[in-house]
Amino acid sequence: MDFSNLLENFEGMACVLSVDTYEDGTYGNILVATGNKAFKDDIENLTKHPFVDNSPYYLSLPKDLNFEDFIHRCAVTHQPLHTYVNLYEMGLWVDMFLWPLKSDKKNTEYCIYSFTINTKANETSMSDLSPETSSMVLSSCIKLRSSEDFLQTINEITSDIRDLCNSFRCSIITVDNENETCEVIGDAHMPGYPSFLRTPEIRKEFYKLIVTWEKTLAGSTCLIIKNEHEMEVLKERNPEWYKSLTEHRVESLVLFPLKYKGSILGYIWATNFDIMNAVKIKEVLEVTTFFIASEISNYQMLKKLEILGTIDSLTGTLNRNSMNNRVSQFDQKKDESIKTLGVIFADLNGLKMINDRKGHTEGDRLLKKASAVLRQVFVDDEIYRAGGDEFMVIVLNSSKEEFEEKTRKIFELAGNESNVSFAVGSAFQEGELDIRKALRKADELMYEDKNQFYVRHPELKYR
């Protein structure tokens, strides 16, 4: 067939693609049959080689499973298609149109591929969606922007996406590259499926697999696996992940990275989905993930600010602001679930002398060692740095014996650390709880202990 005259009517870049088909429904070679002048000039400029008709498409265009699927759907099933994709590794946005053509050749189908390229996203192209897709994307955006509980909303959206995909499971996972771990923030699955990544150890192990996904995407905006042929491609790219998927009886997969300002924050994926809806799923998720990634970035930033506002940066314990807020919570509302209350003040002896004689760097080291001792003792309790050398601990729903044992253990562990010595005061309440009274009593006893310490060690008194 002569496509030259047809293509020259296109002002932009356009080409005709051919697809070899087999009786079992699979496809073989995808070739660029020919292109118009704009297409050939651009390809020759990029490759520095003359364009040759009927050459493999990947010599002229990026090799991509999703692109191959679009070509197959258009040429073989005669569906006109449009999509807008981000080739993020190349820093390009591509507006793609495909139209099926009649074929006079057995076992070969054709389509026209026309496209425009920009270095920046075009809002009009991104929002050029079908009414059904627009409705789903808008629904997700409204939920995200009106949410008072981000994680609850993410779970709702995950459930919506699972319904769209008609999949066994859909999950949203964030990655923490600094700590080499991951977290499931959204999960929806069929009844009877267990939750996964439940322990820190499992999350750290799964992170090792997640970091391979970006390479597996090979520059594509997503990975969609619908059949054995595409699963075999995955096996070649990522045999370890292929093994994991087959062990869990995954036969089809949709995976989208959640990217924000060039960084991958996590992934959304659905397993064993309705492959007949692959085009619609891709259209919805390409836009929805854009907004989800933005909201995840905002959520993570707020969490970091919250941590900065509540954590003592030197010792890693909660700071005085957190302590004041916690005490106010006790004042304002009685929590029926709290049956006993233990309060401990632990003041680090000799810090001022260390600061003055050896410098604040040594003093900071001493504070870190002291906080490490407290964290060893009060693993599941609330530890606050109340002031320069003073820590406060709140212990809830402990027996008096357990509380006294923890208090005793402070001295035992501190004795194993050089220069770490605490003056300690404690108060325990059950029944009628009054945190203010407990604080006063613990503080008074701590100062009594401190005075006795300096009576025993007058040479260390330095303030």
Image (cartoon, helix red, strand yellow):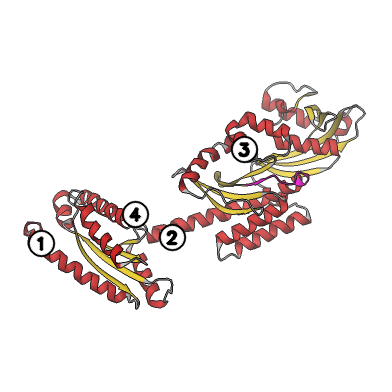
User: What is the x, y in percent for residue 284?
Assistant: 71, 51
According to the image, label 2 marks what residue?
A: 306
Viewer can see residue 199: yes
Viewer can see residue 63: no
Q: In which quadrant of the rendered image does the N terminus lie?
A: top right
**Callouts 3 and 4 close, C-beta under 8 Å:** no
Q: Secondary structure at mark 3?
A: helix
* Residue at (75, 39) in percent of width and height: 115
According to the image, label 1 marks what residue?
A: 454
* Residue at (65, 56) in percent of width and height: 159
- Distance from label 2 to label 4 (Cα)? 14 Å
User: What is the x, y in percent for residue 135?
Assistant: 73, 59
First in sequence: mark 3 vs mark 2: 3
Q: Nearer the viewer, mark 3 or mark 4?
A: 3
According to the image, label 4 marks what residue?
A: 316
- Distance from label 3 to label 2 (Cα)? 40 Å
Q: How many C-alpha atoms fall within 10 Å of the one at disc 3: few (<14), some, or many (≥20)? A: few
Left or right of residue 209, residue 412 in this image: left
- Distance from label 1 to label 3 (Cα)? 65 Å
